[in-house]
Structure formats: C-alpha cells, structure tokens
Image (cartoon, helix red, strand yellow):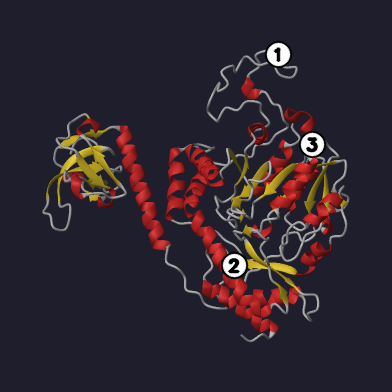
Amino acid sequence: MNEPVEPGNIYIYNVPFVDSSKAKPRPVLVTSLPSSKGDVMGVPGTTQIENWNETHQIVIRPEDITEGTLSKTSVFPVSKQMVFSPRFFAAKVGTVKPAVLKTMLRQLTCYQVEQYCHAISTKESFTPGETIIPAAGKVIGTSERTNMVEAVLDGHLTTGRFNDAFEKRLAGFLGMRHVLTTNSGSSANLLAVSALTSPWLGAERLQPGDEVITVAAGFPTTVNPILQNGLVPVFVDVTLPTYNVDVTQLEAAYSSKTRAVILAHTLGNPFNPDAVTNFVRQHDLWLIEDCCDALGSTYKERLVGTFGDIGTISFYPAHHITMGEGGAVFTNNSKLDSIIESFRDWGRDCWCDPGKENTCGKRFGWQLGSLPLGYDHKFTYSHMGYNLKISDTQAACGLAQMDRLPGFIQARKRNFAYLKIRLKSCEKFLILPEATPGSDPSWFGFPVTIREEVNFSRVDLLKCLDQHKIGTRLLFAGNLTRQPYFEGRTYRISGELKNTDKIMNNAFWIGVYPGLTEEMLDYAASRMETFFGVSR
C-alpha cells in the first residue's frame, strides 16, 4: 500500500473469524502504528452481531466512519486482536471517528489488564512456619486495577468522575448526606477537629484551651488534631475486654471547659453510642466518631459513624477497603460539610469543583474580610486550611472496593468468630475480646491481653509468633501519654488509666482480614496453644 497505515483506519482483509469459519474478506480496524517490520495490530470485525456479546467489544455503525463507508454495522471483539501485514490489506473502507478509536483502544487496554490479572491470580499454597500470616493487608483484583487504568487514561489527575462516584456510593452505604474524600484517615480526623474551630460556627466553635474528652489507648492521629488545634485532650480509661471508653467515667471527666468528645471504635468494636450520645446531648458537646478501623460495624443495627456530628474513615491498605492512601469525612450537617471542604481545599471560601468556575453565580460579586469588592471568590480564604485531596486514580480503586465491602465485612466477622472459638482453650493465659453489648462489629483485628498472673512476658510470646511467621501488632500507641512526643504537652487525665496501662504492657492483636484462610488462623491458634502448653 502506498498510503500510510494509521490507527483508526479500516481495511478489508481475508481472515477467518472463528475456528469453524473460512477466510473471507472482513473489515479490520487498525489499532497500532506499524512496527519496525511494518506490521500492525488490528481487530477484525463481523456483521454477525447477534453472535457476540463480550465484555470488551465495540460496535461500529456506518455513521461512525469518516472518509469512506462501512456497508453494514459490524462488531469488533477486542479478544480477536492480532498482527497483520499491511501489504495484504485490500481496499481501505474508511477511518473511524476519533471517539470510536479512543473507545476501542480503551477496551483493548482494559482487556489486557484483565489478562494480566488472570495470569497473576494463582493463590500460593500455605506452608506452616514459612508462609507469612500478616496481621493486615489489602485484597485487590481485576476491577480495582482496571478502574485505576481507566482513571489514568482519563488524564484527570486530581479528583474527577471516579471520586464523584465513590463519594456518592459511600454516602449511600453509610446513609449520610455528605461525604468528602481526603488523603488519609489521619487527615480526616484533622479536618473533623479543625472544622469545629471555624468562625462560621459562631459561639459553638472550639477555642484554644477548650477541652476534648478522649482515650489514650489508641492511635496517635485520633488525638493529635486536638493538640494541633490548640485544644486540650482529657483522657479517660477504657474497659477490658471491649478496649473502648469506660462510659462510667465520662461525667467525672467533664468540666466547664469541655466542648467536644472524639472517640474511636477500637479495632472495629463500637463504643457504647447510647451512653456517649446521652452524655454529649446533656452537656451540648460535639461528637466525632473515628471509624477508621470500623467500616461496617453496627450498634443496634445502625452503622457506626452515624451517631455523632462527624465521622471519619481510613482507606489505608490495612483497612476494610483501600485506595492505597486515603480517607473520608462524613456528616449530615450541611454547614459542617462546607467547613470541612473549605479546610480540605486550602481554606478557600469558594466551593467550585476543580476546573469549574462561578458555581455561586457571583464569582466577582463578593466582599469578604477587608478585601476589595469583587475580589475573585476562587482566591478568597476563610480558613487556615490545607490541601488534603486524593487523586481520581485512588478513588477509582476505592469505587471497585465498594463492590467487595459486604463480602469483606462478612469475612472479618467469620475469621474473628473462628479465632474466638479456637482460642477458648487459652483463656487461662489470655483475656479474649468481647463485642460491646448490642453491637455487631466489623472487626479490624483480634485483640488479646495477657493475664497478669502468667509466668511469661508479652515479648516472649510475640517473639515466638514472629519466629513462626505469624504477624502481630500492638494496640497502636498503648498509652499515648507515655509516648516520647507527649512529653511537655498540655493534657489532663481524669481518674486513673489502669486498663490503658494494661493494654500498653500486655495487649496485642492478630489479623482477621479477608486475605487470611482458616488454615492460617488455625496455625496461629495452634502455635499459641503450643507456647502455653495447652492440648486441645
């Protein structure tokens, strides 16, 4: 052929289409530039549309052609892509419109991603003592990888269509009006606490020196935003074996400076929302629920995160669903939603989405602060904010994970229940966890506390488990007030933190995430039994 062969061109080529068919003239859509040898990739088509219903295929109609004609509507299944030698091409039919070629190339790319995922999806066999049993981990597959590739092909590097879809999907799952994604669960907590300091809240805003009731037995970034906003954490003890706030101590912790409560649902086990919400309502306090480890947990058939003013979630790979790094803040309060969005997006007053202009209809009609009238609303800032958004590629992964979430939750519950039965034999040595009465936890891990009367240390047991490739984690910071970075910080302790110290000294947890099999859990339990000298 004399003319150059370009992607998007359709030629006639004598080619068989299925094993039972003979070679005959068929349309071939070119999908690549020529190689160094002059060959091209192409997808043959057929007019037998009714015989084809593949996930990745494209139907091309006569009106989809420019610079030529296609006599009949044809289907081009991407699984038929092959190498062609242009010198055997017959007549050129025409060229498809750019949008059609773009769709075909996307289909081809996603098809190859699926083939890759299939090739790597073989499960490794479990070898006791050699195969690592992680405490936590991610479970991703074809849909996540395909979505992420689609997002990359969109070229929309900040939040876009996948983020919009993810926020709506998560809001529907939670039954909440407003969901905003952010770059981590820690950032979600920072935004939640920062939002309560906004001048937009008037007399209800938190001021430097105000007190926030919380617990010290948990993760640092549940508490850090309190300090970062000039507030004072007030620590109360927790109960064993729930690992959650001792609600009987809340009243004693209250003072005239108390303005808010922030509590995590520890390792997926809900704290008692009835007691906590009664307390905050009685004293007109804000309530933030840290649900980073508890997506899907319920209390009296109601999802955690829906009892307070603001809820937060993490999408780090160890958590219930993942997008790599990521988190979300959710609320039913429209004013708080606007404030959180402002803090997340540099503190700006404008609420336009990225790439959008003049959503308010008066972009140059505002007069705020001592700025001149008409100062561009997109560059007017009402808060000392941050830039804590995610990318659309992250949201694409999270959107696919939402399809798996119900199964993930059930797997966590099932694995927890299995360990609870298997480790019953070890109760002489371990305090086993208990769900808060009225709750149905979506467990993040299986926590245990070594009893004080035993003749071994936690380090002894953890070293043994580590030698047998069984992953363990401490209950995060143990007692935050004893961490090095807390020296010199301003805080208050109400009562004693006896159980918090027990957790610091003697507690740890093992995994229940969906990637673990019953064989792995059984091995972990059997190694503990061997360590304790327990026979089944």
Do the CB atoms of the residues marked 2 and 3 lie less than 8 Å apart? no
Q: Quadrant of the N terminus?
A: top left
Residue position marked by numbered label 1 in the rendering: 372
Point 49% across, 40% down: residue: 165
Residue position marked by numbered label 2 in the rendering: 416
Callout 2, which amino acid?
Answer: Phe
- The picture quadrant where one finds residue 521 is bottom right
> How far from the left and from the top, in percent, is residue 214?
78, 51
The extreme top residue here reads 373
Name the disc covering residue 206, or none. Answer: 3
- The picture quadrant where one finds residue 415 is bottom right
The span from disc 2 to disc 3 (Cα, nearest Å) is: 39 Å
The span from disc 3 to disc 1 (Cα, nearest Å) is: 29 Å
Point 70% across, 77% down: residue: 427
Point 68% across, 12% down: residue: 373
Do the CB atoms of the residues marked 3 and 1 lie less than 8 Å apart? no
Q: Quadrant of the C terminus?
A: bottom right
